[in-house]
Image (cartoon, helix red, strand yellow):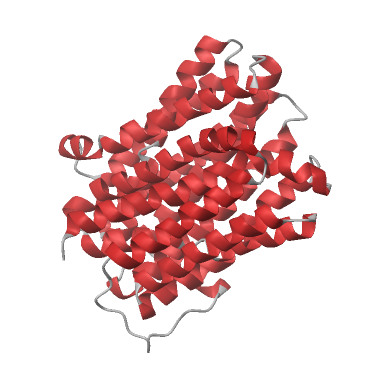
Amino acid sequence: MKVNRIIWVLVLIAIINSMGFGIIIPLLYPYGKKFGVNEHTIGLLTAAFSIAQFVATPILGSLSDKWGRKPILVISLIGTAASFVLFGLANSVFVLFAARILDGLTGGNISVAQAMVSDISSPKERAKNFGILSSAFGFGFVIGPAVGGLLSKFGMKVPFFFAAGIAVLGVILSMLFLKETNKLKNATLKGGGFSVASLVTVLKKPVIGTAIATGFLLTMGQFAMIIGFQTFSVDQLKLSTSQTGLFYAGFGITGIFMQLLVPVIKKIIPMQSVILLISTIFCLGMMIITGFATGVILFAISIAIYGLFNGLRNPMLNAIIADHNDEHHRGEVMGVNQAYISIGQTLGPITAGLVTVISVHSVFFLSAFYILIALLFGIRLILKEKQS
């Protein structure tokens, strides 16, 4: 098995997949308005994806342990393509919700791709390979909104059909060039059904459970920050939509840059949980400073540094989880991890919306609070890793 080839095929699929997702994000609200979507229902439409993904990712991950990664990845990408077509053909708000839920239910491609990286990577190479995969997903999310905005000039439906097309391209690439990485697949293995008990059981594992909890809290912090970012940019800094988009793209690029530096960082600091703790400390400090920012310069600097160190989160956490995971249940555990991330992506914006009644600055302090709790879990993670 050629490890490098598989990694780079996964990178290409990750870019295609995340770019397709990024294309539709800025269009959800303006496109949905003609079907009656308003400021309140857009939140429900966004949450529908995360809730569906929360239910589906542990199931898809478990099925990838039984039947193999490649077929589940292909099925997930087909579901994504179908959901984009539904968006393009929508004639009511109910079809929009159906499309969003379908995308969430088949949205296990992230956790399956992570399981594939875990399958083919040695412990020494995992953090680097997870960094490459994370940067690929991040790159797609950065360029996706720009592509969507450009294509929308040719009609609001065009970006959705284009996103469906690139998802189909991902299916073709997966079928032609991607090799199965799960050599331990066994259709007789138990699993494949959603179980609340399994979500709790995984958390009881000393290292993996602590890592998942840390990632959940850091995700809540990031997605709460995004609400404050959008509100502060428009209401306080008076930036235009395009300026805000470029600003956010810069935030994403800093994270990608740091993810590509993971091999260098690992040579300096070998222990992944220590790297995670250091990055969390920087994220906490920058989020507190952002809460006190009143002008664009301090705001931009603190957000940029936050984005830089936040980029280390996923490579370190995924590598830690993979290192301490049973090889027979890699897909399932990665799926459970993604399920908690989905809930963090939902709860972060919801709680941020509740505190905006106090002030826009309170959102950044709420984000800092989540990061502070994650910092405490990060300290516990170091202790648990040393014990193991």
369 to the left or right of 320: right
Q: Position of residue 331 (x, y in %)?
A: 38, 68
Q: Position of residue 69 (x, y in %)?
A: 35, 70
Q: Residue at x 51, y 42 (%)?
A: 373
Task: Answer above or below: position of 16 versus 51.
Answer: above
Residue 242 seen in this snapshot: yes
Would you identify the image quadrant in which residue 379 lies?
top left
Q: Which sits in the foreground, 381 or 323?
A: 323
Q: Which sits in the foreground, 231 or 200?
A: 231
Task: Answer above or below: position of 369 versus 191.
Answer: above
Quadrant where the N terminus is found in the figure: bottom left
Residue 324 seen in this snapshot: no
Q: Residue at x 40, y 39 (%)?
A: 139
Residue at the extreme right of the image, as rendered: 36
254 to the left or right of 267: right
Count of numbered circles in the view? 0
292 to the left or right of 378: right
Q: Position of residue 370 (x, y in %)?
A: 55, 40
Q: Position of residue 306 (x, y in %)?
A: 44, 28
Quadrant where the C terminus is found in the figure: bottom left
Q: Residue at x 35, y 58 (%)?
A: 114
Would you identify the image quadrant in which residue 196 lies?
bottom right
Q: Which sits in the foreground, 34 or 277?
A: 34
Q: Which sits in the foreground, 57 or 164?
A: 164
318 to the left or right of 1: right
Q: Residue at x 28, y 72 (%)?
A: 182
Residue at the extreme bottom of the image, as rendered: 188
